[in-house]
Amino acid sequence: MIKKLFNKKIYFLLTTGFIAIFVGIIGGVVDIIQPQNVIDTALHLGYPLYFFTLLGVFKILGAIGLFLPKAYNKLKDVVYAGFTIDFIFASFSHFSVNDEFVKIIVPLVMLGILSISYKLKE
């Protein structure tokens, strides 16, 4: 009974849903509306604000793309690659400006969750 509850599909939905909701939807909207913390981060990292607008749009599209049906697996692979690049560059950007360890490691943790989602995708 418990084995049926925690099958591959459940883990896929949990990991993919986490990335889609927190990084894709919430993160994307925050990047687009650019509250003060996004402005401060952009200045601190040396990125122009328009970069975050486009990043936000791509995050939202990526969140949608993570749940495309199996027929679109090649497109889903592009979405996974996009999030992978986002997480690696986020981590490296914070590392490059000598930010605290947590700002460097959080994107890599997200990359780990994304990797689990990718491994479990149908």
Image (cartoon, rainbow, N blue to C red):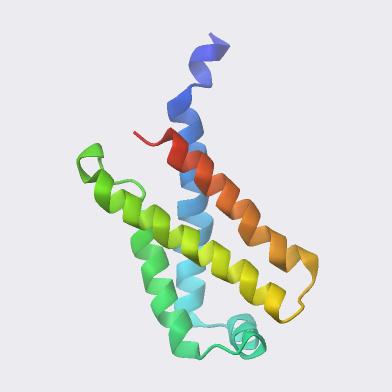
Residue displayed at 37% across by 59% down: 62
**Residue 63: in sight, yes or no?**
no
Above/below status of 119 relative to 45: above
Tell which residue pokes out farthest to the top in this image: 1
Above/below status of 35 relative to 75: below
Using the image as rendered, state which of residue 1 and residue 16 is in the foreground: 16
Above/below status of 58 relative to 110: below
Count of all numbered marks drawn on residues in the image: 0
Q: Residue 95, how many percent across, how many down?
A: 71, 73
Relative side of 105 to 63, left or right: right
Q: Residue 118, how many percent across, how many down?
A: 44, 42
Using the image as rendered, state which of residue 102 and residue 29 is in the foreground: 102
Residue displayed at 67% across by 59% down: 106
Tell which residue pokes out farthest to the right in this image: 100
Residue displayed at 50% across by 89% down: 49
Residue displayed at 46% across by 26% down: 8
Using the image as rendered, state which of residue 111 and residue 20 is in the foreground: 111
**Residue 18: in sight, yes or no?**
yes
Above/below status of 53 relative to 4: below
Q: Residue 121, how many percent across, how many down?
A: 39, 36
Q: Residue 75, how many percent across, how many down?
A: 26, 53
